[in-house]
Every structure is written in C-alpha cells, then in structure tokens.
Amino acid sequence: MSDEERAAASDGGPAVRRLDDWDRSTLEALAAEHGTPLYVFDPARVRENCRRLRAAFPDAEIQYAAKAHTAGETLQTVHDEGLAVECASAGEVRRALRAGIPGSDVIYTAVNPPAGDLDSVVEAWQENPELTITAGAADTVDRLAERGFDGRLRLRINPGVGAGHHEKVVTGGHPKFGVGLDRAPDIAARIDGEFAFAGIHAHAGSGISGDDLANHRELVRRMGDLARELEADGIPVETVDVGGGFGVPYQEDAPALDLDAVADATREALGEIDGRLAIEPGRYVVADAGVLLTRVNTVKEAPSTVVAGVDAGMTTLLRPAMYDAYHAVRNLGSEGDPSAREQVGVTVAGPVCETADLLCENRPLPRPERRDLLAVGNAGAYGYEMASTYNSRPRPAEVTVDGEILRRRETLADVSRLDAAGDSNRRTDEGDV
C-alpha cells in the first residue's frame, strides 16, 4: 500500500501536500484582503498530519515540538488530536498553558536554560505539578533543586550519533545537547532519588529522511540499551523519548517520508523496554500546512538571471539564508495565468541589504512582472517562528485559509515600541516581565 493509501485509510489525508495543491483563488483573495508578505496556515492539514502520526505510532506518546509553530490555535489543534506539547523555552511553556494545555501534557526541554527561564517554569510547575522538565546537564539538575523543584524530571542523553538535513540542525552528537552515555546512569540514579524520574530523552536532529534511518536506528538502539541498563539497576524508566526530526519533502519531486517504515524501524531498534516510547515531531506536523505569500515590487534583468525583488526576505523566511534551504516557489500572477509566459531563470530577492537575502536563485519560473503574487511552499514550520525585525522591518501577519487572524501584522510603531529613548513615561527598569 502506498503512503497516500495508508494515509487515506487512517483519515490522515494525503501524505504530501505540494505547493500546487493550494487553491490559487483563495491565496489571491487573502493577499488582497490582508496584504503581503503574509503567512497562510491551514489547521485542517495539521489535524491530518497528527492523525497520520497517531496511526503510525499508535502506542507511543507523541509530543508536538512547539518551536515549529507556536500559534495558540495550532497548540489547541494538536492537543485536540491527542498530542502533548514539547516546549523549548519558558515562553513556549507559557504559550502552551495559556492555550489551555494541561500541565500533564506540557514538557519543557531545558537547553542551557537562562535563570529567568528556570524561575518561570518552576513557578508554572508549582501551579501545574504534573508538568515535566527535561534536563540536559547535571548542572541544570542542581539549579532546579536549588529552586525547590522535585517534580517530574527527564534526563536528556547525548547518544553520540545525530542526523539531519544540515550541519546546523544535527543535535544528537553535539556536546551542547545532553549528558554522555557514560555519565547517564549516575545522574539518572540521583534524579530517581531526589525527583520523580520521568525517563530519558534524545534527539538526532531535524529533517531526517529515509536516507538517515541508519543513524536514527543507532540512536534509538543506544537509548533502548540505556533504558534496559537503568531498569536492571532498579531505576524504572517511564518513557524513552527518541525525539523527532521527521523530514518533509521540500523539493517538488521529492517523495514523502515513509512514516510507517520509520515507525517500524524505531520499534525494532528500541527493542523490549518496560517504559513507553515517545516521539517529538514538529516540522512534520506543520510544514506543509503553511505557505508564504509575497508580492513582486521590482523586476531587474541581469546577465545570468532575472531578479524579482519582493516584499518578503530573510527577515520573513530565514531558512534559505540560514540553511541554504529549498522552498518551492509558484508565480500566481497578478492578472491572467502566468503559466503561459516564457520560463526564465528567476532569482527571488528580498529587501534586506544582505547577499544572503534570497528566497531562491536562478529558479525556472514564468517571467516575473511587477505586482505578481508569489507563493512559497512548506512555510508552516520555522517560517513565522524565525521571522525577525532585523533592519527594523515589521514581522508579517499570519492568517488561516478561512481568513482568521492568527498573528496581526506588526507596524513600524511596534518595531520601536521597546525603545527607551524618547519615552518619558518608561524607565529602563520598568519593562514588561
């Protein structure tokens, strides 16, 4: 059975949603109403992806990695579909609780946590005692104890193996993340004695494809071995969390991830354990639920390419500049069907004075014209979340396909709102907390 057939059978929708699958007239109407640049998001697609994950991992604890897309409606949607919410910061914990997610379904993964983050999360735990914290260093365990925390605590492991689509997202073997396998038993024993030991955690990286399954298998195997070692030492392991990082096809002709094959490989590599398998997908849940709309404002002929200057750039969608990431681009035109135009090599360039400020380079597309509306695919994961106000540019709006505003468009006044200079009514020590 194909991925598409399996997905349909589990009410999970098609396994791949391509950029061409988005309705052109809907996108044009949203751009006309809300302006550009504009993120468009489809909660219904999030539900489909959640259902496909639950069908592939029916016995696992599935935690949505909130950093991929933190809108309150998204957090509510994934929780409605049976997923917990994994948070990478105190701000994400606050967002999750504010969205109505119970503390029992909120997991905070502390990576070199600032003091303010720990203070905030411990305060949240006092009101939500079932909240779980994951510590990646013995020092973090000490700092939690100093704050009076004695609740549910997982230990993040550095398994010495990682995987991912770019060196900047491979986490499994980097010394920044987790404690080494050799130190894990002693720290786990301490946690079991002083806290409510809630299991072990590791994460290989982001954008894992079928080509990376060997590394994924090895990470899971090592985690299974560690769980059995701890259990043999009398330390119950409630959960073995092997992270997420499941890839999505950014290239137009790339195949869908065979999620059932990943699930089978994960269970086989883990082996028999007393605890429960957990996974943390983020990108897989939301990437193809989002598209970025941007308008052409400048067309320039260059010797080797046609440059289409647009109103979105690296401050709107950072991934191409940061990771050399590929995103499909579709010209929706301004009047008439642009597919009849001559195909030329098009470089889509943003308004930031940086050479890296490109959404694509020399891509075969219909010859661009001023006012053309371009759609950029797979923008639901790490699109809006990584947007910034660099160059003092306001962040874009984000709406659902039905026109509901998820995040309003920032204004120039918003960009300078936190500046102390010139604000006689605000002292530097009276900022928001």
Image (tube, rainbow, N blue to C red):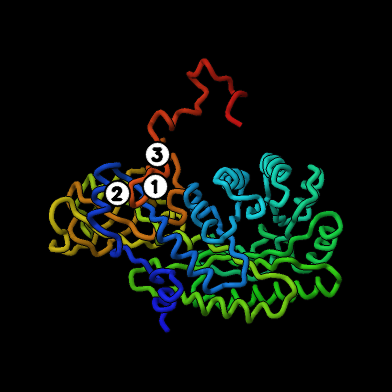
Q: How far apart in space, not on screen, are marks 3 and 1 (Cα)? A: 14 Å
Please say if 389 is above or below 361: above
* In the foreground, 97 or 324: 97
**The residue under label 3 is which amino acid type?**
Arg
Q: Quadrant of the C terminus?
A: top right
Could you tell me which secondary element the residue under label 1 belongs to? loop
**The residue under label 2 is which amino acid type?**
Thr
Task: Find disc 1 in the rendering and name its residue.
Answer: 316
**What residue is at 28 percent from the left and 56 percent from the top?**
347
Among the 4 quarters of the image, the one containing residue 35: top left
Residue 408 tag number:
3
* In the foreground, 58 or 249: 58
**What residue is at 71 percent from the left and 52 percent from the top?**
130
Among the 4 quarters of the image, the one containing residue 221: bottom right
- Is residue 243 visible in the rendered image? The answer is no
- Is residue 276 visible in the rendered image? The answer is yes
Task: Find disc 2 in the rendering and name its residue.
Answer: 294
* In the foreground, 258 or 425: 258
69 vs 177, left or right, is left
290 vs 282, left or right, is left
Please say if 210 is above or below 373: below
Among the 4 quarters of the image, the one containing residue 272: bottom right
Please say if 31 is above or below 211: above
| Residue extending furthest toward the top | 424
Q: Quadrant of the N terminus?
A: bottom left
Residue 210 in the image: x percent, y percent? 49, 77
Residue contact between numbered discs 3 and 1, judged by CB atoms under 8 Å: no
Residue 96 in the image: x percent, y percent? 57, 48
Residue 210 tag number:
none
Label 1: few (<14), some or many (≥20) within 10 Å? many
